[in-house]
Structure formats: C-alpha cells, structure tokens
Image: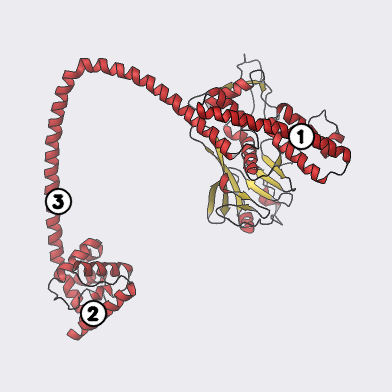
Amino acid sequence: MCPETVEELEAFRRTHENDTIWCGTKFEGGCGRRLTTRLCTDKICHFAHYASDGSVERCGRKAKGKDSANHLFAKAHLAAWLHTQGLTAEFSYPEPLGSAVLVQLEDGRILLVHLDRNRPVSWDNSFWEVILGPGVRIAPSVLEQRGYVQRIRFEDRPGGGRVMRLGTEHPGVGTTWDGLEDVKLTSRGLNTSARPDAVRAPMVTGLRRSESGGRSIVSVAPSRSRAASTVRQDDPVKRALMHLDRAMRDQPDRLYTAVRTIQQLLDTEKVPENIGRLRLALGRGQTQLEERARQRQVVLARLQEQPTIFLLTEATQLMRDLDATAEEREAVRVARVRHDQEQAALRREQEERRAAQREKEWREQTEQRRERNEAARRERVERALVVQREQEETAQRQAQRERAEKLGYLAPFVMGALKKAAREERVTTWREIGDKTGQRELSRLTHQDKLTLLETAENKTLPGSPLWSAVLAATGSDEALRLHRDLLHRLQRPAPDDDTDLLAQITAERVQLRRQW
C-alpha cells in the first residue's frame, strides 16, 4: 500500500531502498511490470509503472485509483480498531482480490467486509456479521428483514491520508456515521450511536437468487508459504512458532499478535514438550516486545524534544506495532503536526524576508505617489460615506412614515372588527378580519406590525378595562398567545408566563366585554 503523504513516502523509500516493487498479477489485468513511487504535492502519492519503449503490453488493471486499495485500508483500520479493544484477528482476502475482507476473530466469529459493488452480498450464516463497503447496494427487502445494515466509508484526512468511518443504515432513515473510536464490538453485536446496545440480527433466510444476481465472492484461506508443509500448517503450535519467528525476523508489526497466540495456546496445551517450546518462545517474544516498547519510548522522548523527519520515519514504523498505545500514536501525530508546522513556518519566514526586501524597494520608489493616491482615495470614500448615510437616513425616515401611515389607516378597521366579534360573542383571526374588512394585507403583517397596530387600536382603552384584542387571542394558538402577551407587556399590564393562566385571563376579559353590551 503506497503511502499517500510526502513525508510518509520519503520514509517508505528509505525503508525499502533495497527492495523492488512489481505490478501484482493477482489483481485483474495486472501486467507484472516493475513499479516506482511517484511523489506528488498536488495530489496523493502513488505507484507508477516505469516508462517503456512501447514493446511491452500496456497494463490492463481496471482499478487504478486509491479505492482499488480499499481492502488494504479496511484491514489496517480494522486491525488497529480491534487492538484498541484488546482483540486480535486473522485477515484474509477472498477471490477476486480486493472484493472483500474476511476478519476471523479469536472466538471463531467471522466478519465479512463486502467491497465489490458489482457482486452480490452473501447473507448466509457463514458470517457472524456483514459490513458493506462504499457504494455497495442492499436490496430493500433484505434491509427491511434485518432492520439495519452496517457500512464503512473512507474520508480524506487534511494533510494527507485517509480515515475509515463506520455507519448504521436503517430502513427509511439513512446512515448514521461514527468514528471507529466510538464503535465497540461486543459478544452481542456492534454498538454504534444509532444502536448503542446492539443485538446482532440473524442473517437473511429464503433470499431468492434473482435478488442477488451476478457472480458470488469465493472465499479462500489466507495465503501461506508454499514451502511450508501441510502438517506444519495444521499444527497450531508449529504454526504459532513459525509466525513468531517470522514476526521477530522481519514483521515486527505482527509480533504482538504472535505473542498473544502463544499465550492462548499455553492455556490449553497439554503436551509437556509443546509447553516447553511455547514458554521458551513466549519469553523471546515478550523480550522483543519489551525492547520495542522501550525503543518507542526513546523515540517518542526525542520526538517531543525536537521532531525531525528521521525520527518521524522511525516512529511511523514503530507505530505499526499492534501493542502501541493510543497515547503513543497520538504523540506521534502531534509530533508530525509540530514538525509540519515548524517546516511551514520556516518556509514562510524565508518567503517573508524575500517579500519584505521586495516591498522595501517598491515602497522607496512609490511612497510619494502612494500618499497622494491614498489622500485622494480617503476623500472620495468619506464623500461617498456621507452621501450613503444621508440616503439611508432618508430611506429609513420614509419607510417609518409609510409604515406609521399604513398602521394608522388599518387601526380603525381592526378595532371595528374586534368590537363586532366581542358583541357577537365569538373569536376572530387576522385572516377573518382581513376578509370581512377588505384589508387582506392584515394577514400578511409581521409580528411587530401586528403588535404596533393593536397598541394603536387599544390606545383609548382605559386602564383596568378589558382589551378588545382578547377576541383575537382567544383562538389559543401559539402565535396568538405570544402576540397577546407581548401586547400586555407593551401596555404595562399583567401577563402570566404560563399559557393556561394567560388563556384564563383572556376568557375573563371576554366575559367582561360581553357585559359591556
């Protein structure tokens, strides 16, 4: 998997300077030609074929973008996520390569991460849970039967790299996304924000073939060395020792998993010879784990003092260890950010010095002309501001006059309609008043205009007398109650905060209005 950022690619090149990289023929259309790494600053870094003279056949790979490595990204993120929960798993890639990832947990459960959008999803009981990749569709009947489906997607990280998020899709609701740090795997299911106490739904039964047309994904076992004998592969003790030796020799990021496997075998092994071999191997593995942990601490301490690209490269390799803690990973991330910021600040400082010199030379040549132009500009701006303020004040006064005239014109119509409604012992609304008076713009007034209009209409109502606008508020709508409460505050009358008490007061005022007739 090619590193995507400049710093990571430079570290990758130093680590593999004596290695060669080839276009894998296991990928559909792979040509088997040699590859190089291409460092880019305007897009993600990537692998590229060496230039040819045209005599060889062109590479026929169909998937060449970053999504073609989704199975590698998924495996890396899932392994780190399981490690944070104290879990380990064995990963394998079904055929065709890149179409899915199989995750076999230590307790025997198998998770299927289905990535191929063009192949049907297996919903049988071979898998404990199925997780769909980006853009993989699910039949509505399957989603309805299961009640949910888990999904993953990849997002570009600022500064380079990608992060993986896990989401839960419900029928008719859509997908709720979480960071992996907020998802927990339990014996019952995957706990997410959308299913905090999840219980895994059973797989789909009775699925018709027509609902899942196309070719199915064929599961295959993880690839093993062809030189290893079948007996050795079938013997868990020999296989564990082989994995430990390989991890200690050239795969330190798998050392933690190998040690955990040996610890688990010691809990169940009965053969004394095997127990002795396992204990001896466990001691060697734990010693190297401790050495790796000390090495991480030394590198992290030096990183905190002064992060350099060489220390960051070493730390990046050490953080591949599954027993690296979240705090250690965060410390490396912080150090990388600090290093990037320091380098960016240095580049900015150099550019600023050059720009300052250019600016100084330009200022010396243009200072007098600039001062004259600036004075003229300020004068024009000040004149324009004066004209603009005068125009705004004139427009504001005109709008206030027109608004006052409009409300003054409408006030008699509103008061007449309110008195008529009170006399007929009924409630009314703004729309009804507009229809009956012919002033239909009443229903389009703003809350503030209605408040001012009612205040104008009630200006002759004596203190202590019931308000005619009570017949408007008696409808009991939220808008009517809010308007009446604001009117009471405007007229400095008691206004209960509780809507029930306010309605009781309005009802009492209507009774008083009926008595006046």
Name which residue lies at 69% across and 33% down.
289
The three-letter code of the residue at mark 3 reads Gln
* Crowd tier of the residue under label 2, counting other residues whose Cα lies within 10 Å: few below 14, some 14–19, many 20 or above: many
Q: Which mark is residue 497?
A: none
- The residue under label 2 is which amino acid type? Glu
Circle 2 sits in a helix, a strand or a loop, which is it? Answer: helix
Nearer the observer: mark 2 or 3; the answer is 2
Q: CA distance from mark 2 to mark 3?
A: 38 Å
- Quadrant the N terminus occupies: top right
Check the image and report above or below for 39 versus 86: above
Vertical comparison of 480 with 320: above or below: below
Give the quadrant of residue 301: top right
Secondary structure type for disc 1: helix
Q: Residue at x 56, y 30 (%)?
A: 300
On screen, residue 122 versus residue 361, left or right, reads right
**Residue marked by disc 1:** 283
- Residues under numbered marks 3 and 1 in contact, where contact means CB atoms less than 8 Å apart: no
Q: Residues within 10 Å of mark 1 (few under 14, many from 20)?
A: few
The residue lying toward the viewer, choosing from 179 and 269, is 269
